[in-house]
């Protein structure tokens, strides 16, 4: 273990000692009747400091008191005895998907302790120019979790009329800038880009930098699914994002090194980010704890076989070339067994199985039976040792990159897996550090006010659970199985999940960033 990592793991205890010396117990008002008290709590407050014993008192949607005098008695309308359990802030998923109007329950997130999700990812938000009106619609649908919204660059290209232009006309460029500014004023926390996807693929660094200036002026950040995550291109993609970091904080979405292997390769990538921080750039990242990615099958196809090109014409004029390209691409990506189809009629089967079933080569299956927009899939293309090293970095937080309907276990299990696998089994992360990565770190990065930490005056998004009991049950074969044993999930001071039972009254809302003018 490096001296750096030893120091990082000693810091929580040092910080806790300093806090204790200053006096950490809030005064309890004996004549007040609180809405909820959580007694005998082992508090892991999200800051990364060591756990301590306390009682939590909640009034309405806010933490009123954290009292380390656990013998004190209180008046409260409801009491939860947390003896033997940990009390922590609700988890914050920095990169999630789903339609909060069509599928507002989001039980997959609540079941693994997630109380806030960030939507508008990979450059795709809704197709409404009026972000405020869309947020109002989400609030009217009463989502099951809180939602922090980002404007998507790909969507803005469509809304502005820029579409597939490599160099947008100035009128379209100004329209995009205005759309970003309006979205931020409506309450968005920043901009996302998805540069492996169309039409964002066609954006130049100059275009991205101009939009980053607008985001920075409004106090937001840019989250990016970068131009490439492949081993030979990832550093160049990071440098492109760091250029935007001259104007606003930047964030690497679901950081990975496709085809890369080993801890040393991870350290090389992390060193690039560390060097940028030393030069004054604010840069962070998130990661889901799986070695298979998930996205549309178009990720496998060449640019000339995707929009705005006509796929039928490609089949007529370049069919053999396309088949050869797809054959080599799949071999490069660990063979047909490593691509698991996650939507459409072949859901749950890998390319090798489908090819055998249809009695044709897998490249023919892709070209003729699926096509660039016919399915999504999971791709087993990452190295576990490398990804684990990325996860341990103190600037990397946890995400799912999942949704209620995605055929990948990350949408139902990511946060539970961190606790079960990396805290309890492998012991790579102390509990307080893992919780910090899932609470205060994302709240600070995004700019979520009064969330992510158990502290007086902060919102009462609270989890009560036994870390040793938490289980990820989702698998690649059955990805929609809920995580288990988060005993209580509180959202805004209200119990929304107790045991395996969810309340019917959803308590989430859109969290709007306040832009300082």
Image: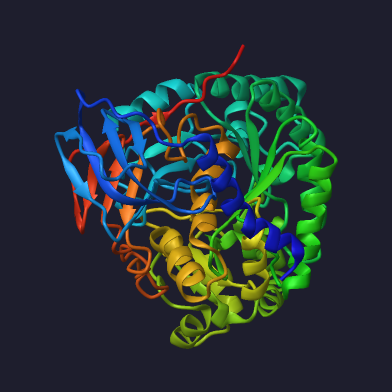
Residue 53 percent across, percent down from the top left: 37, 50
Q: Nearer the viewer, residue 33 or 340?
A: 33
Which residue of the protein is positioned furthest toward the top in this rendering? 517
Residue 359 percent across, percent down from the top left: 49, 88
Name which residue lies at 35% across and 28% down. Answer: 27
Q: Is residue 268 left or right of residue 411?
A: right
Res. 255 visible in picture: no
Q: Is residue 508 above or below residue 292?
A: above
Q: Is residue 321 left or right of residue 455?
A: right
Res. 486 visible in picture: yes
- How many marks the image carries: the answer is 0
Q: Is residue 373 above or below residue 150?
A: below
Residue 40 percent across, percent down from the top left: 28, 51
Q: Nearer the viewer, residue 488 or 29?
A: 29
Q: For the C terminus, give its image quadrant.
A: top right
Residue 369 percent across, percent down from the top left: 50, 70
């Amino acid at each position: 273990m490096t001296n750096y990592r030893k120091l990082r793991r000693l810091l929580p205890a040092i910080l806790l000692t300093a806090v204790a010396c200053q006096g950490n117990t809030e005064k309890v008002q004996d004549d007040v009747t609180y809405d909820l008290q959580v007694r005998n709590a082992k508090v892991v407050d999200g800051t990364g400091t060591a756990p301590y014993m306390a009682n939590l008192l909640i009034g309405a949607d806010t933490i009123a008191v954290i009292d380390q005098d656990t013998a004190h008695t209180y008046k409260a309308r409801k009491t939860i005895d947390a003896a033997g359990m940990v009390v922590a802030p609700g988890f914050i998923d920095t990169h999630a998907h789903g339609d909060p109007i069509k599928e507002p329950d989001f039980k997959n997130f609540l079941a693994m302790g997630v109380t806030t999700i960030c939507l508008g990812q990979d450059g795709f938000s809704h197709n409404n120019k009026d972000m405020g009106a869309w947020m109002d619609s989400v609030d009217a649908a009463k989502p099951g979790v809180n939602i922090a919204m980002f404007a998507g660059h790909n969507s803005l290209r469509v809304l502005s009329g820029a579409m597939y232009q490599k160099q947008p006309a100035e009128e379209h460029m100004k329209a995009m800038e205005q759309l970003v500014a309006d979205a931020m004023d409506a309450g968005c926390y920043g901009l996302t880009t998805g540069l492996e996807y169309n039409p964002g693929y066609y954006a130049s660094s100059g275009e991205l930098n101009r939009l980053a200036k607008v985001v920075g002026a409004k106090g937001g950040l840019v989250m990016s699914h970068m131009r490439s995550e492949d081993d030979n291109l990832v550093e160049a993609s990071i440098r492109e994002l760091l250029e935007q970091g001259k104007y606003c904080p930047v964030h690497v979405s679901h950081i990975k090194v496709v085809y890369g292997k080993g801890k040393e390769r991870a350290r090389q990538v992390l060193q690039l980010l560390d060097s940028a921080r030393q030069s004054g750039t604010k840069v962070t990242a998130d990661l889901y704890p799986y070695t298979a990615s998930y996205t549309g099958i178009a990720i496998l196809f060449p640019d000339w076989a995707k929009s705005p090109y006509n796929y039928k014409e490609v089949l007529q004029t370049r069919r053999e070339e396309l088949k050869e390209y797809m054959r080599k691409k799949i071999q490069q990506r660990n063979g047909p067994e490593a691509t698991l189809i996650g939507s459409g009629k072949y859901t749950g089967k890998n390319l090798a199985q489908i090819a055998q079933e249809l009695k044709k080569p897998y490249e023919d299956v892709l070209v003729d039976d699926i096509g660039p927009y016919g399915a999504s899939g999971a791709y087993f293309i990452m190295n576990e040792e490398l990804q684990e090293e990325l996860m341990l970095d103190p600037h990397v937080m946890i995400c799912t990159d999942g949704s209620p309907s995605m055929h990948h276990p990350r949408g139902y299990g990511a946060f539970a897996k961190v606790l079960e696998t990396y805290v309890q089994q492998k012991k790579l992360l102390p509990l307080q550090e893992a919780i910090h990565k899932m609470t205060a770190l994302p709240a600070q990065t995004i700019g979520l006010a009064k969330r992510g930490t158990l502290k007086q005056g902060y919102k009462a998004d609270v989890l009560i659970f036994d870390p040793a009991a938490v289980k990820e049950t989702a698998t690649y074969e059955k990805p929609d199985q809920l995580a288990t044993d988060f005993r209580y999930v509180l959202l805004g001071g209200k119990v929304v999940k107790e045991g395996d039972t969810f309340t019917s009254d959803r308590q989430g809302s859109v969290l709007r960033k306040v832009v300082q003018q």
